[in-house]
Amino acid sequence: MPTAKSEKKVVTLAYGCQMSERDADTLTEISGQKGYIPSQDLEHADLIIINTCCVRESAENKILGKIGELKRLKAINPQLKIAISGCMVQQPGALERLRKRAPHVDIWAGTHNIHEFQRLLDESDERKVAEVWEKPKETLESVPLAEKGKLKAFVNISYGCDNFCTYCIVPHVRGRERSRQPQDIIEEINALVKTGCREVTLLGQNVNSYGHDLQPPYDFADLLKNVDSIPGLWRVRFMTSHPKDLSDKLIEVIAAGQHLCEHIHLPCQAGSNDILLRMNRKYTREYYLSRIAEIKKQIPQASITTDIIVGFPGETEEDFEQTLTLIRQVTYSQAFTFMYSKRSGTAAAQMEEQVPLDIKKRRLQQLINLQNAQSLAWRQKMIGHTYEVLVEGPSKANPDRLTGRTRGNELVVFPGESRLIGTLVQVIIQDASSWTLYGELTE
Ligand code: 5AD
Ligand code: SF4
């Protein structure tokens, strides 16, 4: 939408996971309270916010490049404010290094104090500001609602992580796992539904252990049941599930839920017991496969997705083979595949036997080739069947067609009128690629 000349514009860029996207929404919302209108136009922005990710070095390099590019815009418009927040800033010792590298940035904020962003914005009228709290201090409820009027929204149910997988920086930057109060989560979702939201994704680093710190006892299964019965909400998703905490009882609740989508993101990370142990994942390949078997038994149509890392320190060719066989055995509808990236401060960064880059690259390619074939096979099996699709808007690749997702989270492209956007329709699948289903409305 064009904005008047006097209006201040904010462009927010989020890198990394859904948590980062949700935090970016929060920052956009707080900026809105200071009169900034959301925009995509970097060249004419008055405020640019980058919510960063530090989970892999490749993400960090990309973000550093972007921050560097902003120097040019600041030279053209010295009034422009640049704010950098998120996990990269929160890494121990990172702030000083980043400030030296990017003196053109006006505001630095850590993950634990983004709800104070309005004050930081005010203070930045006078001077450069940098504030990174080592630990969360406030109650979590002071974070405002996600952007209003969206069809789909992310809702945090817990923050932080206690698992300390040895490769992962998240527990070091997001702190210990804290569950939000159920009534606050339910209230937030009720408010979202009133503004037109029809699908929520409940977010936590390990949603399955939600509630471990709540009194009276209340767990993720209880939360799912309560969210499932919120009037006006059509779909409930959740991520990420940690295999070690995915109980039979929880799978039963998902299977019985009316609006709980049949999609489980269950990262395996690796297929070899040696590597799983070194990763501190706290489960074996056999246990992981028992979880998959239980899901398939109780929810035969479930779409299962995963995260996999190749080239973890000490990963041999045999270990890697075990990952390939695991993938063949499970048949994931989609896998997010990563080359191990050494993160300073994590246990794996100290491990010997780091795998050379060329081997990591080759394994990643092999993994991608296999998963692409599996994803295609998964989607080809859907051909000829009809699925419920929540229509999200025009397809990016095919603007004359609509796009939406099945309950299993598969992307579907089909011809239809724009009045269908925001509704549930039935689509019969006629063709498939590794990433996309193509079909037609049945009514
Ligand atoms: N290197 C590569 N991948 C990583 N992930 C987390 N840390 C690393 C790392 N150091 C991956 C995991 C996780 C996903 C969000 O990112 O697979 O599930
Ligand atoms: Fe990182 Fe493991 Fe926690 Fe996931 S469960 S955020 S991979 S430490």
Image (cartoon, helix red, strand yellow):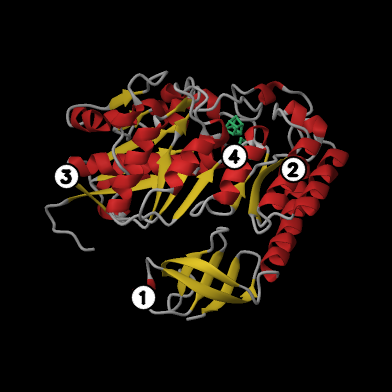
- Whichever of callouts 3 and 2 sits on the residue coming sooner in the sequence is 3
Q: Note whether 420 is above or below 50 in the view shown.
A: below
- Whichever of callouts 1 and 2 sits on the residue coming sooner in the sequence is 2
For residue 244, say whether it is visible.
Answer: yes
Q: x, y (%) of residue 26?
A: 32, 40
Position of 168 with respect to 20 (left or right) is right
Ligand 2, image quadrant it occupies:
top right
Instruction: Answer few, some or many: residues within 10 Å of disc 4's Cα (few below 14, many 20 plus, some between 14 and 19).
Output: many
- Write down the residue under mark 2: 360
Which mark is in front, 3 or 2?
3
- Write down the residue under mark 4: 241
For residue 72, say whether it is visible.
Answer: no
Q: Are marks 1 and 3 in contact (CB under 8 Å)?
A: no
Helix, strand or loop for disc 1: helix
The amino acid type, in three-letter code, at marker 1 is Ser
- Write down the residue under mark 3: 35
Helix, strand or loop for disc 4: loop
The amino acid type, in three-letter code, at marker 4 is Ser
Q: Note whether 261 is above or below 416 in the view shown.
A: above
Q: Any mark on residue 418, and which?
A: 1
Which mark is in front, 1 or 3?
1
Nearer to me, 205 or 349: 205
- CA distance for labels 3 and 2: 47 Å
Disc 1 under 8 Å from ligand 1? The reply is: no
Rendered image quadrant of residue 5 = bottom left
